[in-house]
Amino acid sequence: MNGVLVGLALGAAAGISPGPLLVLVITSALRGGSLAGVVAACAPLVSDVLVIAGTLLVLNQLPVQAVGWLALGGAVFVAWIGLQTVLDARGARLVAGAANERAEARAALRRAAMVNLLSPHPWLFWATVLGPLVLTTWRSAPIEAVALVLAFYVAIVGSKALIAVLVARGRHLLSDRAYRWALVIAGVLLVAAAVALAVEFWPVAFNG
C-alpha cells in the first residue's frame, strides 16, 4: 500500500508540474478536443519504455554531457513545435468533427511522445528518484514495486488527462479570435519552456 501511495503522490506531482509536455497537452486539447488532449497525456506510456530502458542500461554509463545534449535537442524540438503553433494560429478555426479530432489526436501523440523522449526530466527523474526507489522496493517486495510504477503512471497520465478534458470543455466557449490568441499564448509558452530548458542545461552540455 505504501508503494501505491508513493507512486500516486509522485505521479500527481509530475502530472501537474509546469513543463513542455503539460503545455503540449493543453495545446492539443485546444486544437483537437478531449480526445487529442487525453491521447497527448498518454505519451509517457509510449516514450517512457525507452526512458526506463535507457536509464537502467545506458544513462548511468554515459558522460554527464550526454544529458545536456539530450536537453538541448529537446529544447530545439519544443521550440519548433511552439513556433509552428503560433504560425498555425493565424488561420485556425474551431472546427468540430470526429475526423479532425482523430487526425489531431494522432499528431498530438507523436508530438507529445517526442517531447517527452527528448526532455531530460523523465530521464533524470528515473535515474535519481523513481529508478532507485523501484529497485530498492523490488528487492524486498516485488509486487509493491510493480504497484508503485503502475500507480505513478496512473497518476501522471490521469492528472494530465483531467486537465486536458477541462481545457477541451472550455474551448467551446471561445470565439475563433479568442481561440487563435489561446493558441498563440500556448505556442509562446512552449518557446519559453524551450528557452528555459536550453538555459538550464547549456552549461551541462558544454562544461559537464
Image (tube, rainbow, N blue to C red):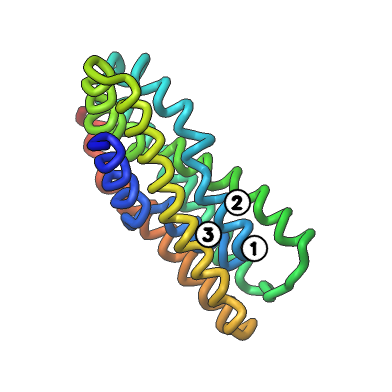
Is there a contact, CB below 8 Å, between mark 1 and mark 3?
no
Residue positioned 55% across, 55% down in the render: 38
Residue 87: x %, y % from top left: 60, 65
**Does the rendering let one see residue 117?**
yes
Q: Determine whether the residue tagged by mark 2 lies in a helix, strand or loop.
A: helix
Q: Position of residue 102 (x, y in %)?
A: 72, 55
Query: SS class of the residue under badge 3?
Result: helix
- Indicate which disc residue 83 carries: 3
Give the labeled residue for mark 1: 32
Residue placed most toward the observer, 136 or 59: 136
Rendered image: mark on residue 175? none
Which tag, 3 or 2, sits closer to the chain's start? Answer: 3
Indicate whether 152 appears above or below 50: below
Tell me the quadrant of the picture where the N terminus can be found: top left
Residue 19: % across, % down: 36, 54
Q: Quadrant of the C terminus?
A: top left
Where's residue 59, x and y in %?
A: 33, 21
Identity of the amino acid at label 3? Leu
Q: Which image quadrant for residue 22?
A: bottom left
Tell me which amino acid carries mark 1: Gly
Mark 1 falls on what kind of element? helix
